[in-house]
Image (cartoon, rainbow, N blue to C red):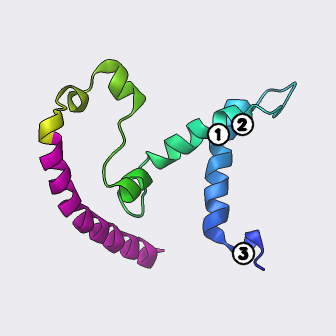
């Protein structure tokens, strides 16, 4: 059995979630009142689409191999959304898969450099 306080990465991730939740749910009369359940997906999305200082990439990119399309990109018609072409997407997806291994190697190198600096 492991104690949760023994894992600093888990502690840090939990602190980041709490820091994101507190300003959204705080109310002097009813501090938490179950509002955190509705706000949790938004906070997690913001954490997953924020780039990491250690790797230089977002966790979404590290898992799925491409950057997330944000709701604001869809609402305001970002160039990336306007330039989407179904047929050209297949070729660009194959190119992106080739570059994904290189990006993950770069992330590992950045992470090692970051950990050495600590």
- Could you tell whether 114 is left or right of 43 in the image? left
Q: Is residue 96 left or right of residue 16?
A: left
Q: Return the residue nearer the eye: 114 or 78.
A: 78
Of the two numbered discs 2 and 3 in the rendering, the one whose residue sits closer to the viewer: 2
- Residue nearest the observer in this picture, 86 or 42: 86
Q: Residue at x 26, y 26 (%)?
A: 78
Q: Which residues are magenta?
A: 89-118
Main SS, magenta residues = helix
Q: Position of residue 54 (x, y in %)?
A: 42, 64
Q: Which mark is residue 40?
A: 1
**Left-right relation of 4 to 76:** right
In this picture, is 43 found above or below 65?
above
Q: Examine the rendered structure and indicate whether residue 86 appears above or below residue 94.
A: above
Say which residue label 2 marks: 37
Q: Is residue 111 magenta?
A: yes
Mark 1 surroundings: few (<14), some (14-19) or many (≥20) residues within 10 A: some
């Amino acid at each position: 059995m492991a104690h949760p306080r023994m894992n600093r990465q888990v502690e840090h991730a939990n602190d980041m979630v709490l820091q994101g939740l507190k300003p959204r749910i705080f109310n002097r009369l009813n501090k938490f009142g179950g509002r955190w359940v509705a706000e949790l997906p938004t906070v997690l999305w913001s954490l997953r689409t924020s780039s990491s200082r250690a790797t230089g990439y977002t966790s979404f990119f590290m898992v799925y191999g491409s950057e997330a399309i944000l709701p604001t990109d869809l609402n305001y018609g970002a160039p990336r959304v306007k330039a989407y072409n179904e047929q050209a997407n297949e070729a660009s997806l194959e190119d992106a898969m080739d570059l994904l291994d290189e990006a993950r190697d770069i992330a590992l190198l950045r992470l090692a450099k970051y950990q050495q600096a600590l």
